[in-house]
Image: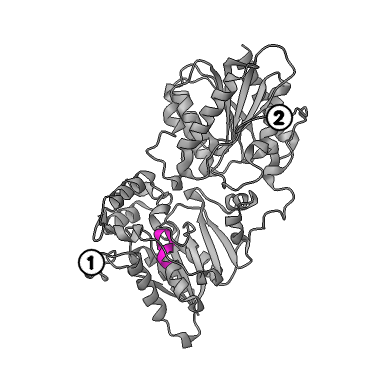
Amino acid sequence: MTVFIMVAGAFTGAHVWEATSARLAEAGAEAHAVSLTALDADRPAAGTGTDLEAHIADVLAAIDAVDPASGRQIVLVGHDYGIHPVLGAADRRPERVARVVYLDAGMPRDGVPPLAAVPDQELRARLSERAASGDTDGELAPPATREEWQRWGSTAGVPDAALDRLTALAAPQPLATLLQPLRLTGAVAAVPTSGVLCTGNGVSVDMVQRLVDFGDPALQALTDPRVSFFELHTGHWPMLSCPAELAEALRAAAAGEGRRLRPAGLCEPPAHLRPFPLEVPELPRERRGHVDLYVPDADGPRPAVVFVHGGPLPEGSRPTPREWPTLVGYARLAAAHGMVGVTLDHRLHDVGDYERAAADVSAAVDLVRADPRVDADRIALWMISGGGLLTAPWLAAPPPWLRCLAASYPILAPLPNWGLTDTGFQPARAVAQVGALPLVLLRAGLEAPEIAATVEEFVTAAKECGAELELVDVPAGHHGFETLDPAEEVGPPLRRAMRSVVGRLSG
C-alpha cells in the first residue's frame, strides 16, 4: 500500500487534490491532501505570522500520522510552492519517505527562500521590496485573480468551472512562507525522486536532458538512477486539468518507473556539439572580448551578420555558445557570402537575465560596428531559439543601420513558466513598430507546440501590421534542426535564409 501525501502550491489548499485523490483511491492507494496553516479553512493561523517552518510542520504531522508498523510506503508530492515544505519535511524524516515527487516544481536549494522560485518577476520584485522595508510578520500576499493565475503558470486544460472554483477558494499567502529560507541538512538527498513535468507550462524531459548535456555540474544529480521523469501534456495545474493522468503518473512514480536522464558525456557528442550540416570554409576566428569575428578575404568594409545564441543556459556550460558548431557554422557561412560573421556570448543564464543579455548583445554590436573592416551601416542580427525574445528591442526601435532581422526556430513570446508577462521582451507586441525593417524567419515544422504557438502569434501580428516578413520553413525540422536533422532536409532552407539576409545587406 502506498500513501500519497500531497501539498498544493501558493494561494491554494487541499481542495485542489480532490479529483486526483479519488482516482488514487480507486486504484487502491491511500491519498492525503495536506491542509496548510493559514491557507486552508480547517487549519487557521495561530498566534503570530505563519512561516515556511509552520508548513513544514504541517507536512511532518501528516507523515507522523502514518503508522510506521503498517508497512505502507510514503510518497510526498509537492506542487509549485508545495515542494518547499515537502523537501523540508523529507529532510527531517528521510527514513519514512520512499519518494519525493516534484509536480511541475522547481529545484529548491538550502538557504534559498521560496520567493526565488516565483515565476511572476514583477510580483517577486514587489514582495522583495516589502521584505526589505522591515518586519513582514503577519503580512499576507493577496491571491491571484481569475485573470492572474496565468502569471503563475499555464492554465491550459483547466475547465472554466474549475478555474472559477480555484479563484473563489484562493487564500492570501502568508508572506513569511515565501521569504523564509528553506533549511536542509542534506539528508533528503538520499530519498529517490521523480519529476512530473507539464509541457504546456513550457518544460519537457527533452529540455531537461539538453540542460544536463550542457555540462552544468549542478544538474548532474538529475542523472542519478533513483531520479525519474514523466510528462503530462497540460498546463501547470494537472490536478484540475487531467486528474486521471496525474494519478497514473504518481502511481508509476511510486513504483520507480519513469524516464531516466543520461549523464553528460555519455552521448558523444551531445546535440549542441554535433557538426554543422553545411560545408563552410575553415576560417579562423578573431576574438574581441565576448565577441568572435570571422572575417572574409574581401576588399573594403564588409556588412556583418551577428548571430545571437539562445537560452537560458547554465552559466558553467563549456564550451561557451559562441564556440558551438552551429554558431561557428552560421558565422562561417556568412563569411563564405562575403559578410563578416560574428558570434558572441551573452549572460542569459536565467529567465530573469534578459535585460543584461540584451545589454551584452548591444555592446557586441557596438564593438562590431567600430571595427574598420565592417560597414557600420549594414548590419544584420540573427537570433536563435530563446534568443528570439531579444528581437523585441530591435523591433520596437530599429536603427537605420540595421538592415535585416533574422531568427532560427525562435521563441517569440515568453513561455508560461517564465513570468515575463509585463517585460519589454514581447516580440509579437513590438513588431507593430518594425516599420520597413525586413524580417526572415526559419520555422521548424516539428517544433514543440508551446514554442510553435509563440511563432504563430508573432507571424499573425507581423502580417496584421504589414511587416516585410519572409518565412523559410523546415518541414521535417525539430527545434535545433541544424544538428538534429539530416543535412538534406535542413541544408536548402538554411542556404535560402542566408541568401535572403545577404541580399538585404548587399542591396
> In the image, what residue occupies the spot 59% across and 60% down?
222
Report x, y in % for residue 193.
Answer: 54, 67
> In the image, what residue occupies the spot 43% across and 71% down?
89
Q: Tag 2: residue type?
A: Arg
| Label 1, residues with CA under 10 Å away: few <14, some 14-19, many ≥20 | few
> In the image, what residue occupies the spot 60% across and 26% down?
306
Q: Note whether residue 185 is visible.
A: yes
> In the image, what residue occupies the spot 36% across and 73% down?
57
The image quadrant where one finds the C terminus is top right
Q: Tag 1: residue type?
A: Thr
Report x, y in % for residue 323.
Answer: 68, 37
Residue position marked by numbered label 2 in the rendering: 285
Give the magenta part as a residue range.
79-86
Report x, y in % for residue 131.
Answer: 30, 52
Circle 2 or circle 1, nearest the eye: 2
Q: Viewer-proximal residue, 245 or 414?
A: 414
In the rendered structure, find residue 48 and report the number of the disc placed on it: 1
Report, in whole angstroms, how far the alpha carbon at label 2 lies from the one at label 1.
62 Å
